[in-house]
Image (cartoon, grey):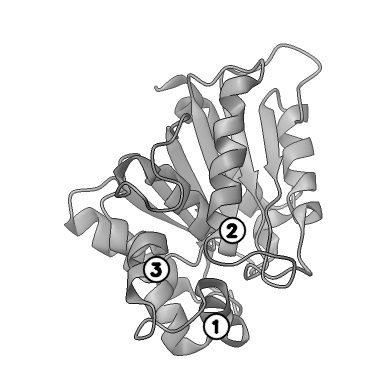
Amino acid sequence: MYRPVSKSVPGVVVVIHGGFWLAEYDLTYGAPLAADLARRGFTALNVEYRRVGNGGGWPATLLDVAAATDMLAALRVDTSSVVIIGHSAGGQLAAWAAGRSRLPSGAPGAHPRVTASAVISQAGVLDLRAAQHQGLGSDAVAQFLGGTVDEVPHRYRVADPIEQVPAPVPVFCVHAHGDQVVPFGQSERYVRAATAAGGRASLIPVDGDHFTLIDPRSAAWLAVVRRLPALMTGR
């Protein structure tokens, strides 16, 4: 947990790193963002989870993210407002976590103890079906869910953010046009589907590439930070 040294903004920001759900990418990618948030007065939780190659994938990765957010209920933190920020694969996990209250009983992560107030997806993989067909991340989606959409369609229905629209909370999709890792169209399609379903979703184009978004010195990160005070206070 990263805590501010001076007066803090109400609520908690949950940071979920990306890396196509693979073991070689860990929470060190989220640490600079969590530290920057604490410097700015926010309480931040940098989440780690099992990944493909170290015991993760379906359903362990989802269960770990659910457990991490639910853990907030047992900590001495203000959970009146919980904003989840996720980058790349973490964007999928953030959007999925925000919709846990709507999961069917028995699904991984159903019946949350802590609910999200908003999601900020940074170049998120928000359309798993399309990502699997495109083979993003060297077929990372099929590795994560244990098969293609034709082989395990029920897993895609549970884990795929675009299958869950409209989300019960606002979703802000920050994405760079120059992203060569996760196509800009991932966020475009999600926002289009969410708004068509009556959801609250916004597309925020930024300059840079896939990793610019997780550079605390970048304008792309500032675009995230500027939205947090209003989201944390409900204004």
Residue bearing mark 3: 155
Secondary structure found at label 2: helix
**Which residue occupies 70% across, 22% down?**
41
Residue 29 horizontal side relative to residue 62, left or right: right
Q: Quadrant of the C terminus?
A: top left
Residue count near mark 2 (Cα–Cα under 10 Å), binned few <14, some 14–19, many ≥20:
some
Vertical order, 72 against 164 (above or below): above
Vertical order, 213 against 54 (above or below): above
Q: Looking at the image, do the residues carrying marks 1 and 3 touch, with CB atoms under 8 Å apart?
A: no
Tell me which amino acid carries mark 3. Arg
Task: Point out residue 111 in the picture as x, y percentages from the top left corner.
Answer: 39, 37
Tell me which amino acid carries mark 2. Ala
> Residues under labels 2 and 3: Cα distance?
12 Å
Task: Point out residue 7 in the picture as x, y percentages from the top left corner.
Answer: 71, 11
N-terminal-most mark, 1 or 3: 1
Q: How many marks?
A: 3
Residue bearing mark 2: 60
> Residues under labels 1 and 3: Cα distance?
18 Å
Say which mark, if any, is on residue 136: 1
Secondary structure found at label 1: helix
**Which residue occupies 75% across, 66% down?**
54
